[in-house]
Image (spheres, rainbow, N blue to C red):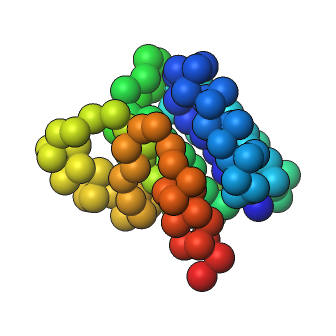
Amino acid sequence: MSFLLVDDDIIFRTIAMKQIELFRITDEVIQAENGREALRKLTEAAKSGNLPKAVLLDLNMPIMNGWDFLTQLEECEIQVVRELPVWVVTSSISTDDADKARTFKQVKGLINKPLSKENLELIKSALLN
């Protein structure tokens, strides 16, 4: 099982990688710095048959933010990519962001930064059921 971690903050990605490894949540984590890079990696992974099981997505990123990524994901021509479960990982406390995120069918939940063992285990459990 693998995850795609999409966040422009290298420090957050580094810490998240260490937590995921420490808690043995998944075998592999693919990283992307923005939504555009993430979509490219998902398309390539789908073509090679090595699609991650879930996306951990930041909302505020340059080039393509999380909202635009979610919109593009819904419109993706590849069905397995379009249906990929997404957990929004954010430092935002805005109820508007939470409400907007829930309008995307791929979004399975919102997680506040930093990641916790409990949140990572919740994602893993949701994917195994």
Position of 112 relative to 59 (above/below): below
- The front one of 61 and 36 is 61
Q: Which residue lies furthest to the right in this view?
A: 48
Quadrant holding the N terminus: bottom right
In the picture, measured across the screen, residue 82 lies left or right of residue 15, that is left
Picture coordinates of residue 61, whole percent (x, y): 43, 23
Picture coordinates of residue 9, whole percent (x, y): 53, 20
Position of 83 relative to 33 (above/below): below
Picture coordinates of residue 73, whole percent (x, y): 48, 49
The residue under the point 75% across, 45% down is: 21
The residue under the point 37% across, 64% down is: 105
- The front one of 41 and 107 is 107
The residue under the point 38% across, 59% down is: 109
Quadrant holding the C terminus: bottom right
In the picture, measured across the screen, residue 18 lies left or right of residue 77, that is right
Position of 60 relative to 120 (above/below): above
Q: Can residue 117 be seen?
A: yes
